[in-house]
Amino acid sequence: MTTVITICDTCKTETWDAEKQEKTDGEQLAALIETAAEGVQGVKTRRHACLMGCAHGCNIAIQAPGKLTYVLGRFTPDAEQAEGIVEYARLHGESAKGQVPFRQWPKAIKGHFVSRIPELPADEG
Ligand code: FES
């Protein structure tokens, strides 16, 4: 089953400078995640404007049908963080219900969890 990484492409970190930066931090992180996800089985990416967590950007969400959804934030546009996000999404995709054992968490995603949302029951989908 495919896990989708939704990346907020309008996020700006505290250091974002409208005069000096052509792209938002979210756009930069999205590009790094898209590059890291190239050729990774079971992982797709998409961009979306504002996930309503602006105070703790950059934000992403990890989702798949029938599995737990995770929202993560406080990322910066950094290749190592992007690779950790993609690896976590790959493990989410391999898991039965979206729960990845802590010992398998990539270092880059530790401390970035914002919320966990349970799957909808089948009769509410
Ligand atoms: S701009 Fe990214 S969550 Fe609002």
Image (cartoon, grey):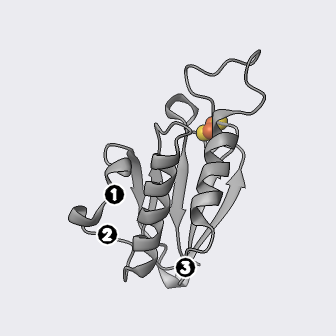
Q: Amino acid at mark 2?
A: Val
Q: Which residue is mark 2?
A: 100
Q: Residue at x 41, y 80 (%)?
A: 94
Q: Which mark is residue 40?
A: none
Mark 2 sits near ligand 1, with its Cβ under 8 Å away = no
Give the CA separation, mark 3 to mark 1: 17 Å
Report if the beta carbon of the residue with label 1 is closer than 8 angstroms to ligand 1.
Answer: no
Residue at image mark 3: 42
Q: Are marks 1 and 2 in contact (CB under 8 Å)?
A: no
Q: Locate the C terminus and report the quarter of the image it occupies.
A: bottom right
Q: Please tell me which residue lies in front, 59 or 124.
A: 59
Amino acid bearing label 1: Pro
Nearer to the camera, 86 or 70: 86
> Mark 3 touching mark 1, by CB under 8 A?
no
Which of disc 1 and disc 3 is earlier in sequence? Answer: 3
Q: Position of residue 104 (x, y in %)?
A: 27, 66
> On the rendering, which quadrant does ligand 1 occupy?
top right
Query: Mark 1 against mark 2, which lies toward the viewer?
Result: 1
Q: Residue at x 77, y 15 (%)?
A: 19
> Would you say 3 lies left or right of 98 here?
right
Residue ranking furthest to the top? 19
**Helix, strand or loop status at disc 3:** loop
Q: Is mark 3 within 8 Å of ligand 1?
A: no
Residue 118 in the image: above or below residue 1? above
Q: Position of residue 97 (x, y in %)?
A: 38, 78
Using the image, tell me which numbered label, if any, was put on residue 106: 1
Q: Residue at x 37, y 48 (%)?
A: 108
The span from disc 2 to disc 3 (Cα, nearest Å) is 15 Å
Q: Residue at x 46, y 72 (%)?
A: 90
Q: Quadrant of residue 95?
A: bottom left
